Image (spheres, rainbow, N blue to C red):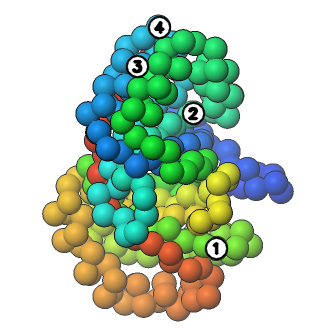
Amino acid sequence: MKKLFILITLISSGFIFAQSERHVMHVFYHMNVTNPAGVISALDKFHASDCGKKFPGDLGLMSETLNGASDSTHFIIASYMTREDFQDAGALTQSCPEAATMLGSLMNSASPVSNLAIVPIIEANDWTVDAAFTKYDMRMNLENEEEYAEAWSELMESNVESGSVTSSYGLNRVLYGNDEFTHFVYIGASDFVTLTDGATEQTSSKAFEKFSRKVKGMREVLNTSLIIPVKAWPRR
């Protein structure tokens, strides 16, 4: 499928493996933030520290600008190229004082809401360059994942051809922390106007009607949210 990077399930346990140039795992730390500048400052200081320079993952802060009744206003995303990197990050942050300082500073500016780990199933184009996302949280049985992924890919390819999708899109499975939703899909764009310009066309097209028939009964959409990236701290 053109311009599409699909991650393949390799073992029966359901873990997903990816090519080395892609993140294989993301961890979301959802928070209710009362002082966004304080959160940014805490992450800035950690990233500049000796411990932060060794951190084996990419960090980012995302604003959940519109997300319904959820208490979460932001989430920190930690992205890892390998599962070993995730493991090493845990060991590092448990042992270095700069990580404890960062966590203490974060608690002065935010309250934890939830956390979860996800693995990409579909990842098309570079989401890290986008400035706005629509995110759809869903509940779906794992047995329907492959069929749903095929239908979603077909829909997105049609949207790309029509011009209603101009940047990244993907499907992710929640590996840990799936008490609220099991999967989510997202569509990214260079800005909010571009993101919303194509929204009406995306849901009124014949391709969407076909997609809706194919996935009927497979998933329940629980929430739709607008996600705006705030700042990124790439791994060294």
| In this rendering, position of residue 194 left or right of residue 4 | left
Q: Amino acid at mark 3?
A: His
Q: Earlier in the sequence, mark 2 or mark 3?
A: 3
Q: Residue at x 32, y 44 (%)?
A: 34
Q: In front of the other: label 4 or label 2?
A: 4
Q: Name the residue tied to disc 3.
A: 47
Circle 2 — which element?
loop
> Alpha carbon of mark 2 to alpha carbon of mark 3: how far?
18 Å
Circle 3 — which element?
helix
Q: Name the residue tied to disc 1.
A: 140
> Alpha carbon of mark 4 to alpha carbon of mark 2: how far?
21 Å
> Alpha carbon of mark 1 to alpha carbon of mark 3: how far?
37 Å
Residue 50 locus on image (x, y percent) = 47, 8
> Alpha carbon of mark 3 to alpha carbon of mark 4: how far?
8 Å
Q: Amino acid at mark 1?
A: Met
Q: Earlier in the sequence, mark 1 or mark 4?
A: 4
Q: Name the residue tied to disc 2.
A: 81
Q: Residue at x 58, y 12 (%)?
A: 96
Badge 3: residue crowd in 10 Å (few <14, some 14–19, many ≥20): many
Q: Earlier in the sequence, mark 4 or mark 2?
A: 4
Q: Are discs 1 and 3 less than 8 Å apart at CB?
A: no
Q: Residue at x 63, y 82 (%)?
A: 218
> Residue 97, located in which quarter of the rendered image?
top right
Closer to us: 172 or 179: 179
Circle 4 — which element?
helix
Q: Which mark is residue 50?
A: 4
Q: Earlier in the sequence, mark 2 or mark 1?
A: 2
Residue 199 locus on image (x, y percent) = 27, 75
> Alpha carbon of mark 2 to alpha carbon of mark 1: how far?
26 Å
